Structures are given as C-alpha cells and as structure tokens.
Amino acid sequence: MSDKPPMVRFEGVSKHYGELTVLDRLNLEVAPTEKVAIIGPSGSGKTTVLRVLMTLEKVDEGIIWVDGESLTHMQRNNQLVPADRAHIRQVRGKVGMVFQHFNLFPHMTALKNCMEAPRTVLGLSRREAKERARELLEMVGLADKLQHYPAQLSGGQKQRVAIARALAMRPKVMLLDEVTSALDPELVGEVLTAIRRMGDEHNLTMLMVTHEMGFAREFADRICFFDEGRIMEQGRPEQILHAPKNERTRRFLQAVL
Ligand code: ADP
C-alpha cells in the first residue's frame, strides 16, 4: 500500500438482508490507482461491496469514503449525519461500474450509449459528448461499430461498449463485476485487453470481482479473499494464489484453479 490517503475506504461497514449478514464490519482501503481483485465463494458479499459503493444498496452500519469524502455521511454542524441525495450524487459521480450483463440501452447505438450520461448528467454539449464517446470506443477497438445497436454486437463487443460508456463519465474509481462471466470463452480476451488499457491509460483505481484467476494474478496489485462478508486474507496475487495462509482460501483455490 502507498502512503497516500486512500481513494476508497470502508470503515466497519455492515449490510444485512433480514437475518442474513452480507457485509460484516468490513474494513477495506484501496490506494489511488491501486487495482484490487475480489475473489471468494458465491454469497460471500463480493458484489455487495461494489453495489454499496455504487449506491445501488444502502449500508446498515459504518462509513464509506471515496476520494476523501464520505459517500454515506456528510458534515453538518460539526457532526457526521447521514448523507442527503445531493451529497450522495456528488460523491457517487467519482465512481463508475461495468456489470456482468452489460446493461446497455438497447434502443441506442454504441455511440449514443456512451453520449447519454455525459450529456444529461455532466451537461456536455452534443459535440463534446460525441468526441469523447468516439475516442473511447476507438480505444476499446470499436471504431467501426459506432452506429451499431447492442443487438447487432457480440457479447465481447457489448462489454467493450459498456467499458467505454463507464469511462465517458471520467470516474476516479472503476468497479467491475464479473465482467467476463457472461461471455463465450473466445470473447474473454478482447474484454480483458480493454480493461488493461482502461487501467493503464486512465489512472483509475479499480475494484474487480472476478473468477479469472489468471487475469487477477497478472493485473491486480492485491487480491482480497472474501468469506462471510469479511476479508479473510489479502496480499500480493502470487502470495494469495500460490501460498495462501488461510485454510478457507486454500480450499477455495483448490476448487477453482
Ligand atoms: P457474491 O457476489 O459474493 O456471490 P453477493 O454480494 O451477491 O455475494 O450476495 C451476498 C448474499 O446476499 C447472498 O447470499 C445473496 O443471496 C444475498 N443477497 C444479495 N442481494 C440481496 C437482496 N436484494 N435481498 C436479499 N438477499 C440478497
């Protein structure tokens, strides 16, 4: 870890669904530009970590910080009180996400998909939004697909549009939720290449939930192994994947590698 203040910080964060504890007083710090892979068994809370950061779910306890500002709380009369909508929207603007199932707008071309939020949320002009969208679609290798609709694209192409669309909002933190899980194996490589370029060229802090252990080993600075809503073990990819200390990490890796 670097000595810079963290870009993302979870401080004692808990999330429950009824009786079920999904995040259990979770502490996690991610340094600026750090790439963190989150692995672990199904139901261990991995996706929930991303969803609460994206404010798609509320936490029950604890504080989340993004780039030095609390996502969950705000200062009022020198006290930390629950954040209001305007505050949440402002901090959440620093975070982008790419989903397992693309979530593209089906009635918009690739170009329009990437222009929509920059225009409506950031207030970019048509020309600026188009320029930005075009550049990003070129970066992910889709210069010849600008006018295609999602239904006319392969899964790998759709996911690359989703990557360009998320980047168009210029987030500081990018969340990736099993972005290759819905793809045919031969399409995984092109998406991983786009993710690599995204990380290299955009100075992003990245948190990715993944089953691609090879990619995690090569791309991530750190792997966090989750179980029962907590980080059971974390460290450099080679240490976690080749010399895990925790018995549960060992068992999980034996099952998936
Ligand atoms: P993972 O990504 O590690 O598979 P998740 O974070 O998706 O785990 O989910 C953790 C647990 O929370 C799972 O048992 C899941 O069924 C449960 N869960 C997730 N979302 C909801 C919800 N909206 N309502 C009830 N239970 C949920």
Image: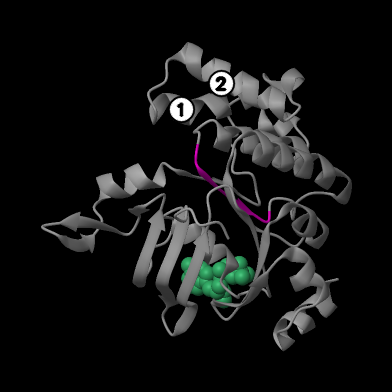
Q: Which colour scheme is used?
A: one colour
Q: Is residue 206 visible?
A: yes
- 216 or 21, which lies in front? 216
Q: In which quarter of the image is the C terminus?
A: bottom right
> What x and y, as percent, mark residue 161?
66, 33
Give the residue at mark 2.
132
Is 12 magenta? The answer is no
Give the residue at mark 1.
118
> What x and y, as percent, mark residue 100?
66, 52
> What x and y, as percent, mark residue 91?
36, 46
Q: In which quarter of the image is the N terminus?
A: bottom right
> What x and y, as percent, mark residue 86?
26, 44
Q: Which amino acid does label 2 sit on?
A: Arg
Indicate the secondary structure of the residue bearing disc 1. helix
Looking at the rendering, the quadrant in which ligand 1 lies is bottom right
Decide: is 215 above or below 244: above
Decide: is 217 above or below 176: below
Point out the stretch of residues depicted in magenta.
171-178
Decide: is 164 above or below 61: above
Disc 1 + disc 2, Cβ < 8 Å: yes
Image quadrant where residue 46 sits: bottom right
Image quadrant where residue 120 sits: top left
Q: Pointer 1: residues within 10 angstroms few (<14), some, or many (20+)?
A: many
Dot label at residue 163? none
Indicate the secondary structure of the residue bearing disc 2. helix
